[in-house]
Image: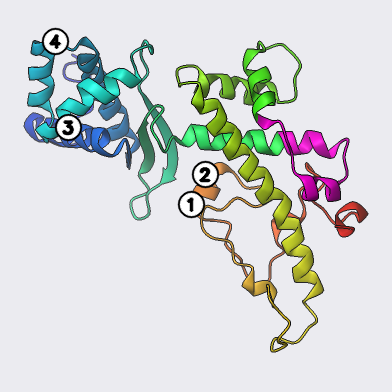
Amino acid sequence: MKHGIAFRKFSRTSSHRMLMLRNLVTSLIEHEQIKTTLPKARDTARLAEKLITMGKKGDLPAYRRANGFLLRPKLTPKVFTELAKRYAERPGGYTRIHKFGSRPGDNAPTAILELVDNPRDLKFEVTARAVGWELLESKLKTEEPSKLVKHGVHNVETTLAQEKQLDAKATGVLRPMTRWNVQKVLKFRPDASLRDLGKKAGTHIDTLLAKPLAVKLLRENAGKGKDEPEQQYFRDIKDLKVKAGEAVPGSSGSALRLAQGALGWTPGRRLRWFERRKLGVDRSITWEQL
C-alpha cells in the first residue's frame, strides 16, 4: 500500500526534516533570497507561503504560530509588517524558484528561492535587460548607431507605460513575452517601480552602446606598443576581461551559463559577442564609423 509518500523525506527523521525546513524558511525571511537544492526549495516555498499568509491575517493566534515556527523570533515582526504590507494586494504566489543548474560534486539540481518583489528581484533585473535589448533593437532600425551613441535612447519610461496598458495580442515595441513580463513584475508593485525599471533598462542600453566603442578602441590599439605613454585604455585583447555573470552585447549563451560565469575570456577562441546580428553589433560599416 502507498503510505508515507505525500512529502519528501530528504533521508531524515521527521524532527530533523522539519528543523531543516524551518531553518531554510528563516533564512529566506531574513535574506529574501537563498540558494539550495531544487527539492528543498520547493518544500521551503510551500511553508514560506503559509507563513506569509499568517502575517497577512495579523491576529494574535497567527502571530504566536509564526513566532513559534521561525528559529529567529526577531524576524516575526518583519513578517507581520513589511511582508504583510508588500503582499497585501497579492492573492498568493509570494515566492519564486529559479533553476540554477547542478551542484559541483554530486550533480544535485540547485535553485535560487526568493521572495517576489524583493529589492534584488532577479526577474525584475532580467526583464529590465530584455527591455533594454529590444528598445535598442527597434531604434537601430530607424537611426544610425553614431546618433544613438551621442544622444542615447530617450522616453524609456513612456514606452514602458504604454506597453503596460496593452493586452497580450496587441502590437507594440516590445515582444509579447517581454511585454507580459513587464506587466507581471509591475502588477503589484508601487508606481515608482516603473521609473526604476526604466532606469535599469536605460543603464543597460548605455552599456550595450559602450561595448562596441571599447572593442573599436581595442582594435585600434592592437598594433601599438605596450609601453607607449599615450595609451590610456585596453592595450591588449587580454585586458578586456569579462567578469562572471556580466552580460555583453552579442552574447548567445543561456541565462544559466551567464549566471555560472561561462563568459570569461578563453585563449584561442573567438569572442562570441562579435557575432550577434540582432542589434547590428557586428563588423558592418555602420559600426566601424563610430
Image point 66% across, 37% down: which residue?
A: 132
Q: Nearer the viewer, mark 1 or mark 3?
A: 3
Q: Position of residue 164 (x, y in %)?
A: 62, 17
Dot 2 crowding, Cα within 10 Å, few <14, some 14–19, many 20+: some
Q: Which residue is mark 4?
A: 59
Q: Position of residue 150 (x, y in %)?
A: 79, 50
Looking at the rendered structure, the kind of residue marked 1 is Gln
Instruction: Look at the image and tell me whether residue 7 can be seen.
Output: no
Q: Does the CB distance between marks 3 and 4 fall below 8 Å?
A: no
Q: Position of residue 74 (x, y in %)?
A: 12, 33
Q: What is the CA distance from the residue labelled 1 to the residue labelled 3?
A: 31 Å
Q: Nearer the viewer, mark 3 or mark 2?
A: 3
Q: What is the CA distance from the residue labelled 3 to the residue labelled 4?
A: 16 Å
Q: Quadrant of the C terminus?
A: bottom right
Q: Which residue is mark 2?
A: 256
Q: Which residue is mark 1?
A: 260
Q: What is the CA distance from the residue labelled 4 to the residue labelled 1?
A: 43 Å
Q: Is residue 107 left or right of residue 177?
A: left
Image point 81% across, 72% down: which residue?
A: 220
Q: Which residues are magenta?
A: 135-156
Q: Secondary structure at mark 4?
A: loop
Q: Earlier in the sequence, mark 1 or mark 3?
A: 3
Q: Secondary structure at mark 1?
A: loop
Q: Does the CB distance between marks 1 and 2 fall below 8 Å?
A: yes
